[in-house]
Amino acid sequence: MIQIDEYTPIVGQSVIDDLKLLAEKLKGRTVQHINSTSVGGGVAEILNRMVPLLRELGVDTKWDLIKGGEQFFEVTKKFHNVLHGRKEEVSQRDFDIFMETSSKNIEEINTYGDIVFVHDPQPIALVKKRGNNKWIWRCHIDVSNPHQKVWDFLKDFIIQYDSAVFSAPGFSQKLPIRQFLISPSIDPLSDKNKDLPQETIDAVLNKYGIVPDKPIITQISRFDRLKDPLGVIEAYRQVKRYIDCQLILAGGAASDDPEGIQVLEEVMARAKGDPDAHILLLPQNDIEVNALQRASTVILQKSLKEGFGLTVAEALWKAKPVVASHVGGIPLQVKHKYSGLLCRSVEGAAFAIKQLLNSPEYSRRLGENGKEHIRNNFLLTRHLRDYMLLFLSLYHPEDVVNL
Ligand code: UDP
């Protein structure tokens, strides 16, 4: 178990002292997180780190999962896609399926927390159970331009919460409840992000047949069309015409994302016949992800839509030069030509990757700036502080600024 004091050398003593002070004020309250999966994707990634640290700080924190079958997760994935602007037909049957499973969860899940902290649309209907405890809805997706019917459906639930939290200013919506802007974070001491010995990195490369002496372009993402895996392959091909390089396109499966295997098959078919294009279905293994990121020459995040994009923060924390799309929370992390390069097309991505591969000194500078940008803004300690202030604000709606 990592102790909170171990973060002091990374963020400084005053940040840790602040956290302890805030935790003290929350003594006696129980915070209950609820989401739909414990593995895969950004929400699980954050909760796996945040929950133990809040407990260690003395805040009684619990984490519960809703249950759902294949049909339910197909519907919630569709909601996710259309909220992100993808064109898909949403029928009354979809809403019915959503409500059937929601009703079961409403019956079965005990919402005992003083503060019930509900993540994303899947468990949103649980708010029907609210008593006189406090309820927060945490939206991790970009709903700046949502499918109106789905948004209206969700909004009926959202307005029953005390507060809503969004990841970036552009994502917020007109709502009659209080809204907070809190960006996600990464844990610098987790297996995903901690320093690794070179032997570990070499062993992972060896396991997947990747050679260390040819530039490596990497995207780590669930196999999801919104991560544009085919665009990644195309950008790599355009680069490879000029620079001999390798591609790693790696992802695992998330239990609330039923589309993954189909997308993986499409990607495999597209990359077939190129021994330098490594399409990897990863086991849930944070050290392997960490090693692949550290072994990379350039990290790509070619998403068409994105919530925050934790993979970008993970890459920048490793001081890697990053090429990433100008979508979702990515521009908060990548300041163009300062902490990475932003792109808006396959051609733009290929051009930026070539520029980085041809300019090691420029790449190094971008990576270093990126690391400091993450240190100052997107580490777990800042996130813990924001959440504890949010919890306290529920009890002190007037004077949160004075806490
Ligand atoms: N991730 C992982 N293994 C994989 C693919 C992704 O551990 O095979 C992690 C990744 O390192 C990151 C998170 O899952 O921590 C993905 O979060 P992000 O915000 O980038 O995207 P999301 O999946 O939430 O859309």
Image (spheres, rainbow, N blue to C red):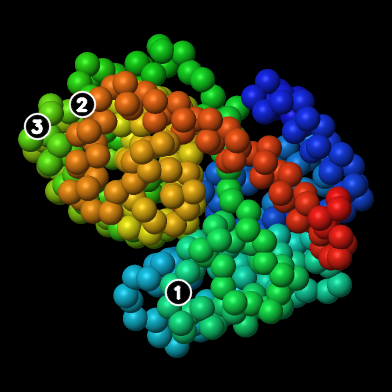
Mark closest to the chain's N terminus, 2 or 1: 1
Q: Residue reaching furthest bottom?
A: 92
Can residue 65 be seen here? no
Mark closest to the chain's N terminus, 1 or 3: 1
Quick one: 155 or 144, which is closer to the camera? 144
Mark 3, secondary structure of its residue: loop
CA distance for labels 2 and 3: 10 Å
Nearer the camera: disc 2 or disc 1 = 2
Residue that label 1 marks: 146
Q: Is residue 365 above or below residue 398?
A: above
Q: Quadrant of residue 299?
A: top left
Residue that label 3 marks: 242
Asked if ligand 1 lies within 8 A of label 2, the reply is: no
CA distance for labels 1 and 3: 40 Å
Amino acid residing under circle 2: Asn
Can residue 388 be seen here? yes
Left-right relation of 203 to 197: left
Amino acid residing under circle 3: Tyr
Q: Which mark is residue 358?
A: 2
